[in-house]
Image: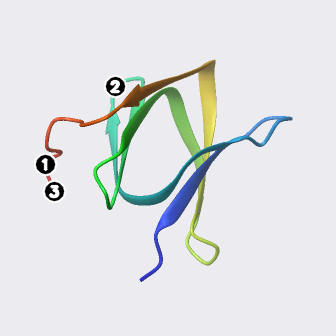
Amino acid sequence: MCLASAYFNNESGQLILKDIAHLKLNGDNVEMETLFGEGKSVKGKVIEVDFFSSKIFLEPKQETVIEVNCLPQLEK
């Protein structure tokens, strides 16, 4: 099973979260959840999804990542 990793699409190319099993666009937020229930939310937008390398690139509105131990159950 290949799970995705999310990165900022800027000079830093910083890893935001790996082992992403679910991603939801919610207004200006990109909400991500790992297979193990760890969640993060980033204000920004998805720029590119590379299915071959399982990478997601985000353009942040701010370099702020909200760490969430347990996101509300995302609808699938």
Disc 3 + disc 1, Cβ < 8 Å = yes
Residue that numbered label 1 is attached to: 75
Callout 3: few (<14), some (14-19), or many (20+) C-alpha neighbours within 10 Å?
few
In this image, 3 relative to 6: left or right? left
- The residue at the point 64 percent across, 73 percent down is 53
Is 60 rendered above or below residue 38? above
The residue sitting at the right extreme is 11
Q: Whole-percent x and y of residue 20?
A: 43, 58
Can residue 31 be seen in this snapshot? no
In this image, 71 relative to 41: left or right? left
- The residue at the point 51 percent across, 64 percent down is 4
Quadrant of residue 47 within the rendered picture: top right
Q: Amino acid at mark 1?
A: Glu
Is 76 rendered above or below residue 43? below
Can residue 56 be seen in this snapshot? yes
Q: Amino acid at mark 2?
A: Gly
Residue that numbered label 3 is attached to: 76
- Foreground residue, 28 or 72? 72
Specify the label residue 27 is tagged with.
2
Callout 2: few (<14), some (14-19), or many (20+) C-alpha neighbours within 10 Å?
few
